Amino acid sequence: MSGAFLVLWNSISSLALQPEYEGWHTFEHVPERVGLPGFIAARRYRSAEPSGQHPPQYFTCYWLEDIAALNTARYREVFAKPTAWSARMRSELRDFFRLPCVLRGSVGVSSASHLATLHLRAAGAGLDGLAPAIDAALAALYAQGGVVSAQWGSLQEAADFQIPITQEATLGTASQPGQDVVLMLHGLDQAMLVAASNRLLSTVQALAVPVSAPAFFSLLSEVRQTDLAHPLTERQPPWPDLFARFN
């Protein structure tokens, strides 16, 4: 019953940091966020293509009841008072990019382990002209087996406080609330999603321009608020023993 989502792209400072980052992100950080009021679930992904000697890219999607989940006192608290491990990892994040979106459309009833993300900007007729074209394109892809499922939303600035991590836009252009859209296409493999992304971009090319190239990821983990053990009136506990293993 989600009405919004928060998506984040990022990398890390070095390939050697990957085991620690993925331990922190999986066991401590993402469950802490999902335990906040208005959060429903989160899915974490790693770039589908080998990164060689460079750190991989990551993508995280938090599903929200509505965009107001990003304006609560509890959400502000986790930024103002990070755990020891979170405080350490903040300085290791690179290419961090965060977009809060209102959910505008969805097709499909299943999930899949492969994901394509697209970040577009409405042109010409604006979002009013782009929205029906996206809905029609996703419906056609799904009806023809081109995607397992897909969701999209429009950017909406939600939090009126400064996020204490540098925002680095892919092309150095500022995001535009009300004009930028994010699409998430779920598929059986990367080849399916490359074809689906190309087809979608071709369909809406007169109505939108890509802010960045499509990115492709594989699922790492998922956590739902209903599965968390601690009452949601409390902050989810840190993992000091796992932190100590790496530090």
Image (spheres, helix red, strand yellow):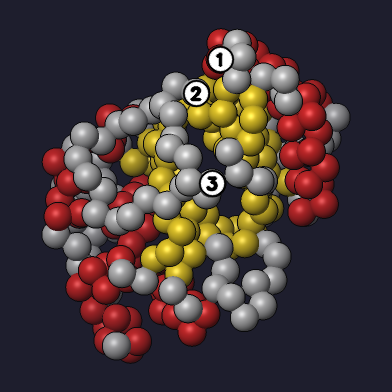
Whether the residues at callouts 1 and 3 have beta carbons within 8 Å, the answer is no
Q: Work out how far the residue at label 1 is from the one at label 3, CA to CA, in angstroms.
A: 20 Å
Vertical position of residue 44 compared to residue 20: above or below: above
- Amino acid on which disc 3 is placed: Leu
Disc number placed over residue 126 in the picture, else none: 1
- Amino acid on which disc 2 is placed: Gln
Q: Work out how far the residue at label 2 is from the one at label 3, CA to CA, in angstroms.
A: 16 Å
Disc number placed over residue 171 in the picture, else none: 3
Disc number placed over residue 111 in the picture, else none: none
Element under disc 2: loop
Q: Residue at x 64, y 25 (%)?
A: 208
Quadrant where the C terminus sits is bottom left
Q: Position of residue 91 (x, y in %)?
A: 31, 69
Q: Total of numbered circles in the picture?
A: 3
Vertical position of residue 1 compared to residue 246: above or below: above
At label 2, counting other C-alpha atoms closer than 10 Å, the crowd grade (few under 14, some 14-19, many 20 or more) is: some
Tell me the mark number nearer the camera, choosing from 2 and 3.
3
Element under disc 1: helix
Q: Nearer the viewer, residue 211 or 25?
A: 211
Tell me if residue 8 can be seen.
no
Name the side, left or right, on which 233 lies relative to 246: left
Q: Residue at x 30, y 56 (%)?
A: 165
Q: Position of residue 238 (x, y in %)?
A: 24, 69
Quadrant where the N terminus sits is top left
Name the side, left or right, on which 223 lies relative to 207: left
Q: Nearer the viewer, residue 92 or 211?
A: 211
